[in-house]
Amino acid sequence: MIIDKPIVNPDGLYNQKQAAEALHIDRHTVARYEADGLIKFKIRKAGKAKVTTGAEIIKCWNGMYSIK
């Protein structure tokens, strides 16, 4: 995972591959983070693909690199 905050549109929709690229991690790691509750995906009605928002990606990143 990158130390710099991911550059994503908070309102944009991202699939697992795009979320993985934004976080600089493997797609399988994103799936594991989803299973652990670190990032939430929704099933899109059109095409039945899993998507998440940019805000959720940033929230996941903040959970890993919270600045205190």
Image: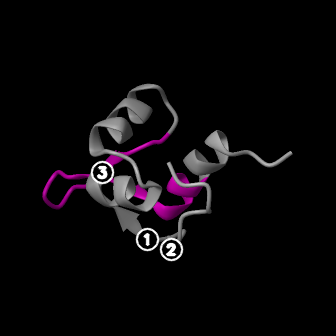
Q: Position of residue 54 (x, y in %)?
A: 49, 63
Element type at marker 2? loop
CB-based contact (under 8 Å), mark 1 and mark 2: yes
Q: Position of residue 40 (x, y in %)?
A: 45, 42
* Residue type for callout 3: Gln
**Lower sequence index among marks 3 and 2:** 2
The quadrant where residue 46 appears: bottom left
* Residue type for callout 2: Asn
Locate residue 52 relative to residue 15 in the image: left or right: right
The residue that label 3 is drawn on is: 16
The quadrant where residue 19 appears: bottom left
Quadrant location of the C terminus in the rendered image: top right
Q: Nearer the viewer, mark 3 or mark 1?
A: 3
- Dot 1, crowdedness within 10 Å: few (<14), some or many (≥20)? few
The residue that label 2 is drawn on is: 9
Front-most of residues 44 and 3? 3
Q: Position of residue 26 (x, y in %)?
A: 32, 45
The residue that label 1 is drawn on is: 12
Q: Which residues are magenta?
A: 39-58
